[in-house]
Image: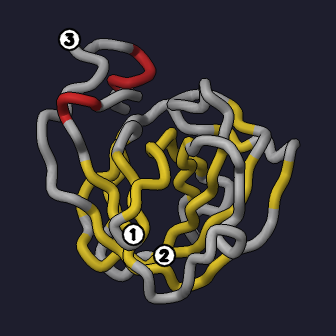
Amino acid sequence: MSIDPHVTKVLDSDFPYIDKSPVVGRLVCILHTHSDRRQLQLAVHPSRAVVKHEVHEVILTSEPDAGVGKVVDRVAHLAYFEVLEGGIVLAGDKVEVNGQEIGRLAGFDYTHSPNHMNLCVRVPEPLRSGYEMGFQVGMSITFSLEPSEHTR
């Protein structure tokens, strides 16, 4: 069996991603729930592939140190989205809903796999659900790389 390069640190770069196409989706279910003890375990992998027509969940956190390999407790649930243009989503991607930046992708949680993946997005306070933010079914969501400002 192969070794995982992100776990074993055998690569000469922690973040080898130079450029990518945006991943585009549309919101298919708006959520309205919060937790201060979610214990979302973000994977050590900074990237995941998503395929057209898959449905995944977006969970928000205002924890400033949320990132790859971390555990996240304080969350609000945003929405489920359907992938319209697949590709690679990366920790640090800028996340926009209907063209408005809401935060940066912190990482991935597999609690509900293979049904769907949780994409955890680090956002500023106040921490609000998709319902509280006024989002609606059909709005667009985009995950894009900004190489000069990319943070993990």
Give the image location of residue 144, x and y in percent. Answer: 27, 52
Q: Secondary structure at mark 3?
A: loop
Say left or right for 88 vs 70.
left
Say left or right for 74 vs 3.
right
Q: Residue at x 62, y 66 (%)?
A: 78
Q: Secondary structure at mark 1?
A: strand
Tag 1 or tag 2, which sits nearer the N-term? 2
Name the residue beneath numbered marker 2. 81
Q: Secondary structure at mark 2?
A: strand
Name the residue beneath numbered marker 3. 12
Give the image location of residue 59, x and y in percent. Answer: 63, 57
Which dot marks residue 141? 1
Give the image location of residue 48, x and y in percent. Answer: 37, 49
Q: Residue at x 36, y 82 (%)?
A: 53
Choose top left, top right, bottom left or bottom right for residue 72. top right
Q: Are marks 2 and 1 in contact (CB under 8 Å)?
A: yes
